[in-house]
Image (spheres, rainbow, N blue to C red):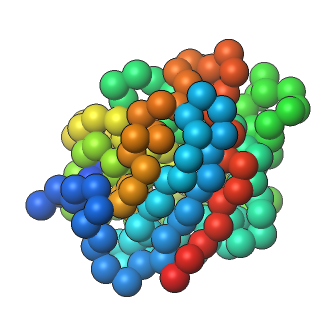
Amino acid sequence: MSRKFVLVAALLASPAFAEGEPDGPGPNLVIQVAGQANGTIVIDMLPDRAPKHVAQMTALATAGAYDNVVFHRVIDGFMAQTGDVQFGKSGGDLSMAGAGGSEMPDLPAEFSDISFQRGIVGMARSQDPNSGNSQFFIMFAPGEFLDGQYTVVGHVVSGMDVVDQIAMGEPPTTPDVMTRVSVQP
């Protein structure tokens, strides 16, 4: 499988979301992070904008597939990528991290009018727009060049201070780990 591209999600287009402003009744993805960054990230998922992607990420989190997965691609001023449940488990050989997905099927793109701003969470994919699977990214800064090319699945409502502390690198020398990922209504 080719190395997946992922550019972490940004904020909604008009107006952009601010941390702490939930969009609506979506479930929350709650990520416990350990490593250089240490704390909790809460992502308000957007099932009204990306129902298939949110359902797949929710299923993976509920099954524990995201537990102990590293942030394998973290680019300063851009985004932090994680979610490779196949090759990104902490403590294993991370040489293929970013090239895998999950046993679930790839998903068709669910593009929206949401702009990739700081705190937006997007679904990673390969060159094929219909290849989102398990990997996702969180935007450190605006990346409007991603608009309409990657599926936005949510936005950070708390814990951007934790995101900002994630170790940089492709992969980082000592990657941060999502120790536990859960879903809350």
Compared with residue 173, is residue 162 higher up or lower down, i.e. above or below? below
| Residue that appears at 47% across and 41% down | 162
Instruction: Give how far across and how far down residue 57 sits, in percent.
Output: 60, 65
Is residue 65 visible to the viewer in this orientation of the structure?
A: yes
| Residue that appears at 36% across and 60% down | 157
Furthest residue toward right: 92
Instruction: Give how far across and how far down residue 30 sits, in percent.
Output: 56, 62
Compared with residue 24, is residue 20 higher up or lower down, i.e. above or below? above
Furthest residue toward left: 15
Q: Nearer the viewer, residue 154 or 104?
A: 154
Instruction: Give how far across and how far down residue 114 sits, in percent.
Output: 24, 59
Compared with residue 44, is residue 137 higher up or lower down, i.e. above or below? above
Looking at the image, how many numbered discs can be counted on the residues? 0
Q: Quadrant of residue 100?
A: top right
Q: Nearer the viewer, residue 110 or 79?
A: 79
Q: Quadrant of the N terminus?
A: top right
